[in-house]
Image (cartoon, rainbow, N blue to C red):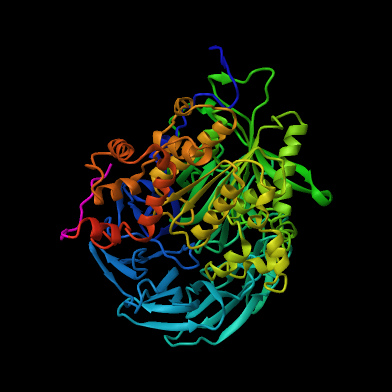
Amino acid sequence: MKSKIKSNYGSWASEISPQKIVEGGLIFSEIRTNDSNIYFLEGRPSESGRYVIVKQNSDGTTEDIFTQNYNSRNAVHEYGGGSYAVGKQNLYFSNWEDQKIYSVNGKNISPITEEPDNPRALRYADLTLSNDEKWLFCVRETHFENKEAKNELVAVSTEKKSTIILASGRDFYSSPRQNPNNNEICWLEWDHPNMPWDGTELFIGNFESKSNLEKKHIDGSKNISIIQPEWSSSGELIYISDESGWWNLSKYSKGKNSTILSEESDHGGPSWQFGFSTYFIKDDFIYLRGKSKKSNKGLIRKINFSGEIIEEIKVKHTSIGYISNINNNVVYIGSSPNSNSEIATLDLIEKDLNILKESNPVTFDLEDISIAEEISFPTTYNEKAYAYFYKPQNKNYEGLAEEKPPLIVISHGGPTSATNDALSLSIQYWTSRGFAVVDVNYRGSTGYGRAFRDSLKGNWGVYDTDDCIAAADFLSENGLVDSSRVAIKGGSAGGYTTINALTFHDRFAVGATYYGIADLSVFIDDTHKFESRYLDTLIGKYPEEKQKYYDRSAINFTDQLSCPMIIFQGTEDKIVPPSQAEIMAKGLRDKKIPFSLIMYEGEQHGFRQSKNIISSLESELYFYSKVLGFKTFEELEKLPGVGHKSASVIMSQGFGHPAFPVDTHIHRLAQRWGLTNGKNVTQTEKDLKKIFPMNSWNKLHLQIIFYGREYCEARKCFGLECKICKTCFPDRKKPVQTKKP
């Protein structure tokens, strides 16, 4: 046996590079089937995060449904979902660029919804075909200038450009589904301030190709969450309800509601996106995803309408979603502790499991994978929280005997979401370098019942932060990590938790926030409809409880900050606007605390472009490394996987080292302004350093970025419109064609 190299934790060389994380990096979602084919959405970071509908043919071959001109993604609720529907002959999808619905028949692609007065003002989600395929039932979201968006349940004709409004007047709608035996359709409704996991109402109505359905209330209320309604072939309405305190299977049949399966287990999850499924119905049996409590295996459970479990089939995937069926096969997206997301089919007769496609095949040694250990730990108010703990793991390295590993605490987004034990290369990136990682399911996370989920109400910014600190303390007290070298990171709601933990507590040495909230009051005035009243329950009513918002906004207490922070933000984020990151950066700058603010042009809420995913991982590692004692620029760049640009950003912004970081944004502008010949970013950096004095570099590169973002935009100026371009090149007539690096 080869002896391992003894080396400091956090400094191990790893095969799991940022490039490897994104080189496959496909994002699977939304499985659909017809009689002969399987369809799924494939998000491609290499194509700027474009979502492509892929068809899996019966012979095993795959093909893209459309060309690069299209992107099957909608912006309803900003999170989208339910972006396409498959019929016997035609396929229909919502296109990202214009938000119109398109019909696909072979190579013929044409819009079936009208062009709105304002671009992208009409958005469609949760697309479902009627039995005769003459109509698409869907949620339509209409956007106005300086006015809240309007949500409605509509039917869109597949034969002509016409739309019928089926239901309106409520704040939100979802899940339109038609009874296969008649004209009945079901759907869900709810109002502010509820989110769909707080309370929804299930209705049915008779569709007769006319507006304003007469509706009948079936189940649900302000305090009962109903999700995933589906019809059986015999006309029973199956759905999931949390009335028992857990999301369990229920049914409506012959005018009565009843519970099918009552377990202390959540069989559904929060509806952040449309179209997610955890079960399907076939031949009057329910096929429900699950997880074995006796072994670390996933389950496909066959259940009759009386709740009797007929069969349980074990599969390797512990995380299963978007479950569907074709013929005698279950089709789903699954992952496990040692495999990335996969499109899988399970033969219900032979019990054979077949992998159709892997998102990012594991090409490195499985000995480098750290397997998650599920833990629970005590937290404030004599309660407990949960997490998945990952020890450092690398087949070539072991830590020094006198040293314990540094710890990274991860706070998930949502906050009503949850993490699981499925393989995450973004976590393995850290563990294979000698970091320990704890991925926390703090109070408020789903998967632990309604009471645990509701415990965050009124306590966001407190309980989540407490639980992250408690996780770090628990691991430190048990001798598993170095108590003095603890970082915290998170995105979106997890970014808010991170910012609060670094501001109101002194437990952490460093932190990284991805598109996190710094000022709650600004978030109220500057966010989208879906979450615009979310804080009413998480914090309190506004403005009646305005003081709570002030007290839990870190930006008001930057004088308490005492440790370095790196901030990542997309410039086109509509959920957490860039102003949040800029506000926090100003607070850190005023306090003279080392920090770095990295803005990614064109990114939204969550990064989809390969180059930016790579950059953020590299930058985060470099920032941590510098805080932990790397002294020079050269040492920083010698780290495994280091990139010059990322190191430049950290050294210039965080620690004042003179540098001129050049990204594609600055590279493009420098060409437009005649400052470089535009061969590559390396040459552009050299040219700019020659032109401008060293003492201006750190400030100037930011000034160029901000000017370009506001005035010399990528898709508007082209060297002809902004003040600099017109002043410096008054005789320029043609757009500047910039060279890509």
Residue 734 visible in the current orientation: yes
Q: Position of residue 286 (x, y in %)?
A: 57, 60
Task: Say if 210 sits above or below 390 in the image.
Answer: below
Q: Quadrant of residue 41?
A: bottom left
In the visual, does 170 lie left or right of 462?
left
Q: Position of residue 726 (x, y in %)?
A: 24, 60
Q: Quadrant of residue 20?
A: top left
Q: Position of residue 323 (x, y in %)?
A: 51, 55
In the visual, does 92 lie left or right of 504?
left
Residue 738 located within the stretch drawn in magenta: yes
Q: What residue is rendered at 56% in x and 15% in y?
A: 4
* Quarter in which the N terminus is drawn: top right
In the visual, does 554 lie left or right of 734?
right
Residue 338 visible in the current orientation: no
Majority SS type along the magenta span:
loop
Q: What residue is rendered at 40% in x and 33% in y?
A: 644
Q: Quadrant of residue 550?
A: bottom right
* Quarter in which the C terminus is drawn: top left
Between 320 and 618, the one lying in front of the other is 618
Q: What residue is rendered at 41% in x and 42% in y?
A: 696
Between 63 and 16, the one lying in front of the other is 16
Between 520 and 376, the one lying in front of the other is 520
Q: Position of residue 214 (x, y in %)?
A: 54, 87
Task: Say if 206 sits above or below 354 in the image.
Answer: below
Residue 276 located within the stretch drawn in magenta: no
Q: Provide the residue span drawn in magenta.
A: 731-741
Count of numbered marks: 0
Task: Say if 60 sits above or below 233 in the image.
Answer: above
Q: Residue furthest right?
A: 382
